Amino acid sequence: MKKAKLSKFRDLRKKRGINLETIARELNVSKAYVSMVETGKRSLDYQMAINMAKYFNSTPDELFLDDMSK
């Protein structure tokens, strides 16, 4: 996946009160990795996009694609 600022992901994570450490542990990645993905400093691969979406009971499209109606 191309690098992108994943503000929907970050917003949902914060809204649910989940910190970087918790989600990193659940996804078996480092806290730094999650932070870099959220800010667009690190690319997100397809499998990790699926894993992150599953964590939030969502789909990758809902979680990561920009709202096309704007």
Image (tube, rainbow, N blue to C red):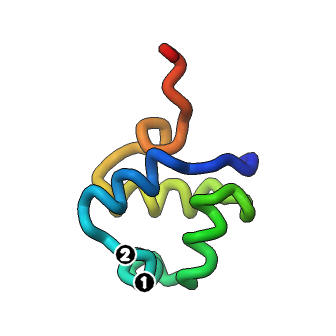
Amino acid found under the numbered disc labelled 1:
Glu
> Where does residue 10 sit, x and y in percent of width and height?
45, 56
> Where does residue 7 sit, x and y in percent of width and height?
51, 48
Amino acid found under the numbered disc labelled 2:
Asn
Circle 2: element type: loop
In the image, residue 29 sits, relative to residue 35, either above or below, namely: below
What residue sits 34% from the left and 61% below the top?
A: 14
Q: Give the left or right position of residue 4, taking residue 48 as reference.
A: right
Q: Which residue is mark 1?
A: 21
Q: Residue furthest left?
A: 16
Tell me how many marks there are.
Answer: 2
* Residue 23 placement: quadrant: bottom left
What residue sits 40% from the left and 43% below the top?
A: 59
Alpha carbon distance from label 2 to label 1: 5 Å
Circle 1: element type: helix
What residue sits 54% from the left and 55% below the top?
A: 49
Q: Give the left or right position of residue 50, taking residue 58 as reference.
A: right
Mark 2 packing: few (<14 Cα in 10 Å), some, or many (20+)? few
Q: Which mark is residue 41?
A: none
The answer to whether marks 2 and 1 mark residues whose Cβ atoms lie closer than 8 Å is: yes
Q: Which residue is mark 2?
A: 19
